[in-house]
Image: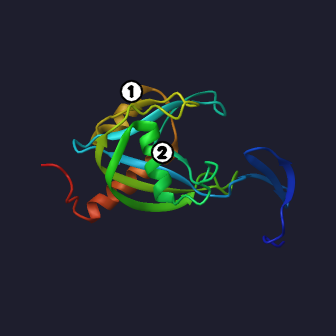
Amino acid sequence: MSHESTPQTLYAGRHITMFGRHGWEFVSRNTRRPAVGIVAITDDERVVLVEQFRPPVGRKVVELPAGLAGDISGQEGESLLLAAQRELLEETGYAASRWTELGVGYSSPGLTDESIVLFLAEGLQKVEAGGGDGTESITIHEPPLANVAEWLAAHGAAVDLKLWAGVFAAQEARQARGNQYKQK
């Protein structure tokens, strides 16, 4: 069986298209651009998380700040870094002076071809209120990075697994560089 055959369009919506290939159904975003996720760490070693209601799961979910690149009309060619900077500011009100690309992977490869690029944001400065773009209702949390697992368990909300991947990747990157930016 060839894995390279052209998929059949099963449904085409405004934001996503559902395809079928070899009996497998999957979706693609119509923009066909990666998403971005941001592990934002404050100077006092807190990780900036967002919580918002997610209709597909029917409840609030704690997540990394994240969003789509090139999803704004007239800015379809937006770089991934600019998208990450925009999303961090929009969702949390923070701007960051240091950015590190942590890696890229697929968000749910059994369901979608969407990839996500994770960034580490440091040197944070609160410059706006955050909370989303007007269509979103986002609550911002800043638990201690060292105790994020305990905080999440006590908080009791659903957790986006990309949060765990991002925190792990950020800790590995910071350890590899000796964390020279950590405040003393």
* Position of residue 121 in the picture relative to residue 44 (left or right): right
Give coordinates of residue 5: x percent, y percent: 83, 70
Q: Amino acid at mark 2?
A: Glu
Query: In which quarter of the view is residue 94 placed?
Result: top left
Whether 116 is drawn above or below 147: the answer is below
Cα separation, mark 1 vs mark 2, equals: 27 Å
Bin the neighbour count of mark 1 within 10 Å (Cα to Cα): few under 14, some 14-19, many 20 and up.
few
Write the residue at 46% across / 51% down.
84
Write the residue at 84% across / 67% down.
6
Bin the neighbour count of mark 2 within 10 Å (Cα to Cα): few under 14, some 14-19, many 20 and up.
many
Looking at the image, is mark 1 or mark 2 nearer the viewer? 2
Secondary structure of residue under mark 1: helix
Residue pushed farthest left? 184
Which of the two residues, 104 or 149, is positioned nearer the viewer here?
A: 104
Question: How is the rendered protein coloured?
Answer: rainbow
Whether 4 is drawn above or below 172: the answer is below
* Position of residue 34 in the picture relative to residue 91 (left or right): right
Residue position marked by numbered label 1 in the rendering: 154
Residue position marked by numbered label 2 in the rendering: 87
Secondary structure of residue under mark 2: helix
Give coordinates of residue 155: x percent, y percent: 41, 26
Q: Which of the two discs, 1 and 2, labels the residue nearer the N terminus? A: 2
Whether 147 is drawn above or below 170: the answer is above
Q: Amino acid at mark 1?
A: Ala
Give coordinates of residue 148: x percent, y percent: 34, 38
* Position of residue 85 in the picture relative to residue 125 (left or right): right
In which quadrant of the rendered image does the N terminus lie?
Answer: bottom right
